[in-house]
Structure formats: C-alpha cells, structure tokens
Amino acid sequence: MKKIIIPALFLILALAAASEAAVQPMVRLKDIVTVEGVRENQLVGMGLVVGLQGTGDKGQMAMQMMSNMTQQFGVAVDPKQVRSKNSAVVTVTCQLSPFLLPGQNTDVLVSAIGDAKSLEGGVLLQTPLKGANGQVYAVAQGPLTIGGWSESGASGSAAKKNVVTVGRVPNGAIVEQGVPMSFAGGGSLNLLLRQSDFTTAQRVASALNTKFGEVAHAVDGGRVSVSVPASYRNSPSAFIASIESLRVRPDAAARVVVNERTGTIVMGGEVTIGNVAVSHGSLMVSIQETPQVSQPGFRANRGETVVTPQSDVDVRESGGQLVELPVSSTVEDLVSAVNTIGAKPRDLIAILQAMDQAGALHGDLVIQ
C-alpha cells in the first residue's frame, strides 16, 4: 500500500517566549563579538598517504606522485611501472589558530581525492601547507586516526563504520611561520559582532561606556570602535580580557527559518502574528495494488497466463476548522492554534507560507 499525505508532515522546533528577558538572555561579550584582526587562517596542501593494505588509489595520479617522490631521493621510476594500491593521494587542510608561533603543533584533516577505499592504517608523508598567498605556513606528517573501520569479504559483502576515507593527524602539523596579528593599532580596536544588529551594537557600546567611561561607539550594525583606556595602553591584551566577561543582552530580528529538506522550523520568540483566520484540512490519497492472474480458457489452443495489477484508489479529506488569531499574537499562540485545528507539526510550513503571503506574519520568512 502507498500513502500520499498532502501537505507532508514535517518536524517543528518552536522557540516561544513570554517576555524579552526570556527571548534573549544576558550573555558574555566574548560570546557575541570577535576582535578585528584576530582570526584563524585556512591552510591546504596535497600529499600522499602510504602504508595502506590494498585500499589505496588505482589511478595514475597516485603513481605519478610516487614517481616524483622517489626522484627526490635519487631513484628514477617510470610512473607506468608503478603498480601499487598501498598509497592514496589526499588533501590536507587545517585551521591555523591565531598567535601560534613557529615550532608549535596543530591538528590536520586528511581527505582522499581519488578512488581509495580506506585510509585506515595509513601514514601521511611530509606535506607543505600553504595559505591563500601561496606561502608555506606549516608542514604536516604522521599516522592517521580514522575513527572507523571497513571490512569486506571475497564474495563482495562489506561492512564499515563511519567514513574511512577521511582522517586526522593529531598535532601532525608543525608551524613554520606565524601569521602577523594587529588588533590594537593606534590605541584603539574594533569589536565585530557575530550577528550584525544595530541594537546589539549600541548595547555593547553602552556596556563598555558604563564601565570604562566614554570609550566606545557603534560604527554600524556589525562593528563597535573602542579606544583603549590610558591605564591599558601598554597591555591591550589585558584590556580585552577585562571586557570579555561583560554581560550584554543581544537583540535579534524576528525571523522564521524553514528547512524544507529536513522539515525543520525554527521561530524566534520576537515573531508576532497579525489578525488572521486559519483553516486547515489535509488530503490523504491511498493507493492499493492487487495483482490479478488471467489464464486462457480450457479449450483455447493459444494463450498465456498474464498477471495484471488492479489498483484501488481511496481519497479522503479531513474536515477543516477555522481559528482566528488576534492582533500581536505570539509564537506560543500560533502553536496553540495549530494544535486546536488538528494540524500536524509538518503542516505548519504551508500555514506559515500562506500567512506570509497574506501579510499576517510579522517577521522574515527564510526558506532554505
């Protein structure tokens, strides 16, 4: 039996709140802002993983890289003569954290490029890691940790756990040169909001001015300029540490995010509903196929047995119910109304889209 339900059932996650304090709690300043100039840098390189048990690449790229590697050690080998499945070409990536100095270590992520079946048991050979400017900032090497396994039998059956073509080398990269960081030049610094909002930027500036005097002002919705007080001019890092623990109540725009692929709906507590009436009814179509066998007659000279499907279609539409929502209704009121008319959580996607088109949804409807 096949069942088609219109509209489809989706999962809902509704975040409702009754007051402003419940909608946005007080959070630390370090959790909503970053310091301009202090950031991570992406590094990438292409390397070779060896020591695999016949689960490596079968293509020519791995053979060519093995030939190039042997030539660096004074051994000339024709790539066409290399026949091995114990190596794999990989990309090596890492996030170079700020303030890492030469000689310190960081983790790297190793991912297969070709048709390797597994990187289990492999060892990454020395791989330079470059930044966007082409300079080498770190060098990676070491044994991989996969976090999974893969086994296969001679008959073709196989079993595996997790992804075995991606692994990590803990502390496998040695930093060769650090990235210069400048965050307090000229006695001032900029705080960048993780979520841009004019109200939040103004609240951050007010919190700083309350504690240190008139030292901050909101440049725009995503940046707050701060003058380092005279007592901290010789140690701007100490000033940043002192402001990270300040408590600020961030603000956010009223927004409803709908992910139609997963059926997830997230509604902020600031979303309000205008005066609107909602009626909902679902349509269910049931299709049941029964095979029927047709045979030729007893006296027939020719003919053959034929199986023909017989389909029974049943259409049912549940009765809708009309519910009116008053002006300035909240998310909690909407959820209660949806439960009243008997709509399932997944039906809320169609209701929200209709409300937005009717102009009754006061908030941004974002469909991913």
Image (cartoon, rainbow, N blue to C red):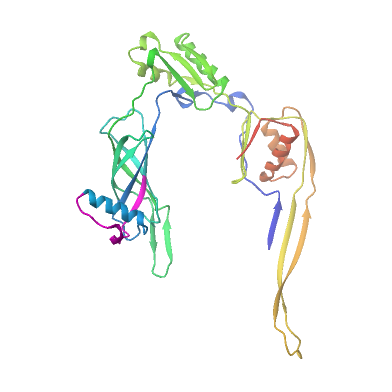
* Residue 29 in view: yes
Total tally of numbered discs in the picture: 0
- Look at the image and tell me in which quarter the C terminus lies: top right
* Residue 120 in view: no
Whether 78 is among the magenta residues is yes
Q: Is residue 110 above or below residue 42?
A: below
Q: Residue at x 70, y 39 (%)?
A: 353
The residue stretch that appears in magenta: 73-91
Q: Residue at x 35, y 54 (%)?
A: 61
In the displayed structure image, the side of residue 303 where residue 121 appears, left or right: left
Q: Give residue 18's position: percent from left, percent from top.
A: 64, 28
In the displayed structure image, the side of residue 366 where residue 299 appears, left or right: right
User: Which of 192/43 is in front?
Assistant: 43
Q: Give residue 146's position: percent from left, percent from top.
A: 36, 50
- Give the residue furthest to the left: 74
Q: Give residue 365's position: percent from left, percent from top.
A: 65, 34
Q: Is residue 159 above or below residue 358?
A: below
- Look at the image and tell me in which quarter the N terminus lies: bottom right
Whether 113 is among the magenta residues is no
User: Which of 138/230 is in front?
Assistant: 138
